[in-house]
């Protein structure tokens, strides 16, 4: 019997996929990746076994996710189409790479996922697998099976005794990890409908809270956040703390029309409190320590880096090359950024670094001014020379 490693979320689609694959002659190994999605795995493991999984493999990938994926993207300044902080997109190459490793360890000849045929995740999973081991067969049950609706899947699950909770099912499709939440479907499919309060997961209730302004300080070392409010802090704890704090203020909500890789536009809603705060803090510290030409050039690199992540091209030579460039830009991105938090907003109010390029004696308009303004006339004449008629 052929073995297949299924990327298993514990939800309806992948639970049904276990039985569906087993009926087609596969021994199914359900693989679960913990990237901080806040789900308990006990019920999901029991559900997988009830559906027919021969084995359930669980991998805690949170630390690797932060150090090897989130921090490189943060240092690059990667934000897709200027707004999406790439939480789901960043997790997929990691999950798929570990899936390939599990397949090798279990002597499986195939891998499978529960992605739909018009989403981005199918590309991210399958391209990663093909790059890392093109000999593995890739199965996509949701693209191939006979079910035409969610109700068809529910009836199939009930017929085969797969314990699915259907009564509490949210109308929204939700994906969580430590870097953010993605919310879509339901009424959100109408781009002109305001997201209802119950669509939000982390920031729900922020509109009713009467919160005072809060000032926080984030410390960076070579582009990596290492401390909060004067205390050194381990990466996962730092992100978790900022998610909790930012969520109370409703920070990090995004509602955007997004261009999917497959060519369609979709309405996407996100929550990314820690990501929003850290990206702003990091960008402002870069502005203090990087020279103009390097800073401007890096903005183009940030856009390309975000596209590579979004398009599922993490394990490519270009992404590796861009990482090498980004690392050199971060050598002096060390210091502290001070931010003020208000309801639905976070903004920088101070920054300091031992590598600051800011020179007050050149920028000031007081008696401390050492800038020789008489030089400006010659500079302007030379600057305009190529364009004079």
Image (cartoon, helix red, strand yellow):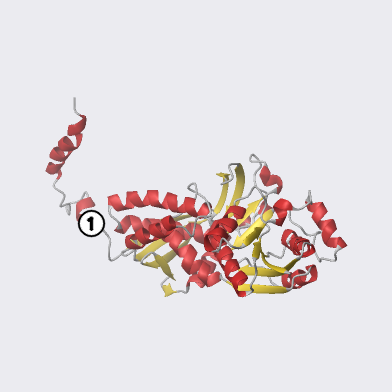
Total numbered labels: 1
Could you tell whether 168 is left or right of 218 in the image?
right
* Quadrant of the rendered image containing residue 53: bottom right
Single out the residue that lies furthest toward the right: 159
Q: Position of residue 127 (x, y in %)?
A: 56, 56
Could you tell whether 330 is left or right of 200 in the image?
left
Q: Position of residue 48 (x, y in %)?
A: 75, 69
* Quadrant of the rendered image containing residue 211: bottom right
Examine the rendering and report whether any part of residue 345 can be seen: no
Q: Position of residue 172 (x, y in %)?
A: 70, 53
Q: Position of residue 329 (x, y in %)?
A: 33, 60
At x 66% / y 73%, what residue is drawn?
Answer: 57
> Are there few (<14), some (14-19), or many (20+) residues within 10 Å of tag 1?
few
Quadrant housing the C terminus: top left
* Quadrant of the rendered image containing residue 124: bottom right
Q: Nearer the viewer, residue 301 or 171?
A: 301
At x 15% / y 52%, what residue is drawn?
Answer: 370
From the viewer's perspective, is residue 130 above or below residue 3?
above
Circle 1: element type: loop
Quadrant housing the N terminus: bottom right
Which residue in the protein does label 1 denote? 359
Q: Nearer the viewer, residue 372 or 199?
A: 199
């Amino acid at each position: 019997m052929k073995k297949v490693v299924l990327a298993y979320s514990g939800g309806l689609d992948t639970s049904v996929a276990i039985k569906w694959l087993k009926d087609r002659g596969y021994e199914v190994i359900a693989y679960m990746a913990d990237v901080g999605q806040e789900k308990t795995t006990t019920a999901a493991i029991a559900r997988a076994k009830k559906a027919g999984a021969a084995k359930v493999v669980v991998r805690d990938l949170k630390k690797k996710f932060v150090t090897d994926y989130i921090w490189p993207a943060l240092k690059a300044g990667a934000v897709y189409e200027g707004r999406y902080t790439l939480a789901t997109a960043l997790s997929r190459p990691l999950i798929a790479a570990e899936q390939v490793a599990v397949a090798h360890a279990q002597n499986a000849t195939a891998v499978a996922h529960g992605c739909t045929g018009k989403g981005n995740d199918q590309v991210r999973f399958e391209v990663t697998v093909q790059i890392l081991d093109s000999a593995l067969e890739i199965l996509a049950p949701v693209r191939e099976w006979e079910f035409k609706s969610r109700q068809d899947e529910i009836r199939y699950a009930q017929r085969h005794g797969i314990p699915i909770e259907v009564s509490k099912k949210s109308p929204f499709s939700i994906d969580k990890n430590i870097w953010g939440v993605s919310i879509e479907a339901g009424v959100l499919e109408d781009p002109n409908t305001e997201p209802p309060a119950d669509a939000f997961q982390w920031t729900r209730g922020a509109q009713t809270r009467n919160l005072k302004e809060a000032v926080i300080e984030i410390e960076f070392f070579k582009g990596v956040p290492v401390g909060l409010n004067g205390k050194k802090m381990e990466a996962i704890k730092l992100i978790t703390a900022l998610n909790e704090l930012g969520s109370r203020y409703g920070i990090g909500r995004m509602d955007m029309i997004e261009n999917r890789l497959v060519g369609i536009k979709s309405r996407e809603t996100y929550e990314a409190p820690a990501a929003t705060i850290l990206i702003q803090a990091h960008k402002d510290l870069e502005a203090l320590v990087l020279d103009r030409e390097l800073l401007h050039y890096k903005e183009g690199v940030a856009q390309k880096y975000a596209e590579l992540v979004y398009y599922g091209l993490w394990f490519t030579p270009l992404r590796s090359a861009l990482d090498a460039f980004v690392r050199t830009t971060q050598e002096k991105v060390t210091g502290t950024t001070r931010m003020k938090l208000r309801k639905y907003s976070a903004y920088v109010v101070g920054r300091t670094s031992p590598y600051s390029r800011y020179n007050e004696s050149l920028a000031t308009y007081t008696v401390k001014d050492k800038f020789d303004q008489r030089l400006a006339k010659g500079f302007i004449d030379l600057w305009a020379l190529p364009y004079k008629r």
